[in-house]
Amino acid sequence: MASTVESATEHLSKLGIDGGFANSSSNLRKNLHLLSSEQIELAKMLIEMGQSHLFEHWPEPGVDDEEKRALFDQLARLNSSYPGGLKSYIETARELLADSKAGKNPFDGFTPSVPTGEALSFGDGIFMNYEQAGIREAKNAAFVLVAGGLGERLGYNGIKVALPAETSTGTCFLQHYIECILALQDASCGLTQGECQKEIPFVIMTSDDTHSRTLELLESNFYFGMKPTQVKLLKQEKVACLDDNDARLALDPKNKYRIQTKPHGHGDVHSLLYSSGLLKIWHDAGLKWVLFFQDTNGLLFKAIPASLGVSATKQYHVNSLAVPRKAKEAIGGITKLTHTDGRSMVINVEYNQLDPLLRATGFPDGDANCETGFSPFPGNINQLIFELDPYIEDLKKTGGAIKEFVNPKYKDASKTSFKSSTRLECMMQDYPKTLPPNARVGFTVIDTWLAYAPVKNNPEDAAKVPKGNPYHSATSGEMAIYRANSLILKKAGVQVDDPVQQVFNGQEVEVWPRIAWKPKWGLTFSEIKNKIGGSCSISQKSTMVIKGSNVSLQDLSLDGTLVVDSVDGAEVKVRGSVKNKGWMVENVDYKDTSVPEEIRIRGFKINKIEQLEKKYSELGKFCLEP
């Protein structure tokens, strides 16, 4: 033992560590021989930063030595995965916790105003022109899916991207997204003179919770038709939890040799993209755009072509997709903030901050609707389009670090202790806070019914939502897909019956005909219009599923269920009258554990009684006329 102590003392002197360091944690000093030089330097920094409590419980050498080493392995990971390391994390935490305790207003000195952007009206000439521009640009884009969360909040034990977006086809969110990207790729390359070999890159940001299951979902389904080389998974690390206003790192209550960690937020996607080297690879390949989206919005890609067209036409460095927003609605507003020192930025302001900010800066009515019936501050839906080159230049300065916030839950009004540990968080939509004043930051407003139906609330929480507000549940998310497809066909000239109101899992929703199609059938409104001719009608009880790219509807009368599945080289014309018993939507009790979770959380199942189903697996021209 004497030689061990001597070697530790010698080690300390070589590292320039004085007695003050050793005395601050005598238990650590006894165990220094277990650590590498780098780990001792890390320990020195932590003690200087007031973290000696991490080692106070350490027993004599020979007891739990592997656990002690494991703690430092974890500390090293936390240190390397955060820009500036743990020292920077602790310093930032102390500053933000002090501001939180003092009740500091993050918008102090800023005056809000309505930013510049583009509001689109689905189906008109301007919308269709932007869609065409977006299709042309799609081959120059990369897509980034932020998918670090589990479905626990939904009442679903799987990863959220494995959840079916709708149950008529059973297509999960990840499959839907991949099929949309592949359809964009084919359509964009189809507009190119000559040969187009471009493959659109697809990045998925995962977490410890979702990484292996996301990879398994991809591999077991052969990447849903995408080349594995197109897909890159980037795993975000969690960050250390904080026990108090002094930013003391929290030990895991279940293991005194581990730091308690929690997710840092989807803002990490920027630093991960930067450190991965992917942005340079994309730049060298001639890409121009990066599109960010979240994991359970089944409507999003209906808005992507037009929004990308806006970015290209307006030359926006940052384009936030947005929807019309009612005043005081629980969704952040895209706002221009101008500081008294002249700084300005276009940024999302959370709904609970926007109204008081407006009232405090000369707007006595606060967040109020304007003559359109909506707030002039459009609703942020966290889908972003960045121009690649300015993005790279900005990340060279910041390393992808995003301005953080902290949201401690205090035990009482004194704000001296927390109910439970907290941590720093960051959001990807806060990226514009780092941009220079001359950055071109705008937004694109698209109808909610076309662009936004997130699935995030469990049945009980959704049922408590005040009447008239969106449920954002698996129930409403699926019904929103049918609604959007029905409204698109109506706009294209199809007579679609009005919906009926039904209640599932305590949520009253519109039930439209269950219409679903693969993205390759219709990415843009003009493409869909061109596949519909004559007088077509669809009854409310009907279901129509189109799985081929070259399927056209001509004088079709549908009262029942029709499923058409065709290979790409098959041209199928569907005409005449289709009438059968169809597929029925039947109530399911979400508490009935005999029903699979992914069905139970919707409150309904589809009972497939009768259908006309045709599959065309050969090339050629065909006519389906019952």
Image (cartoon, rainbow, N blue to C red):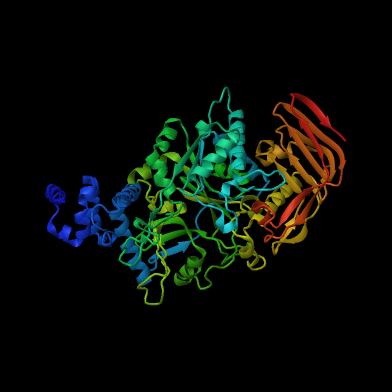
Residue occupying image coordinates x 67% and y 52%: 596
Residue 279: give x, y in percent of width and height. 42, 38
Residue 172: give x, y in percent of width and height. 63, 44
**Residue 281 placement, left or right of 93:** right
- Please determine whether, in this image, residue 73 is positioned above or below residue 467: above
Q: Is residue 373 visible?
A: no
**Residue 438 placement, left or right of 169:** left
- Please determine whether, in this image, residue 122 is positioned above or below residue 283: below
Depth order, front residue of 39/271: 39
Depth order, front residue of 48/343: 48
Residue occupying image coordinates x 45% and y 30%: 285
Residue 60: give x, y in percent of width and height. 23, 57
Q: Quadrant of the C terminus?
A: top right
Q: Is residue 510 visible?
A: yes
**Residue 174 placement, left or right of 580:** left
Depth order, front residue of 115/86: 86
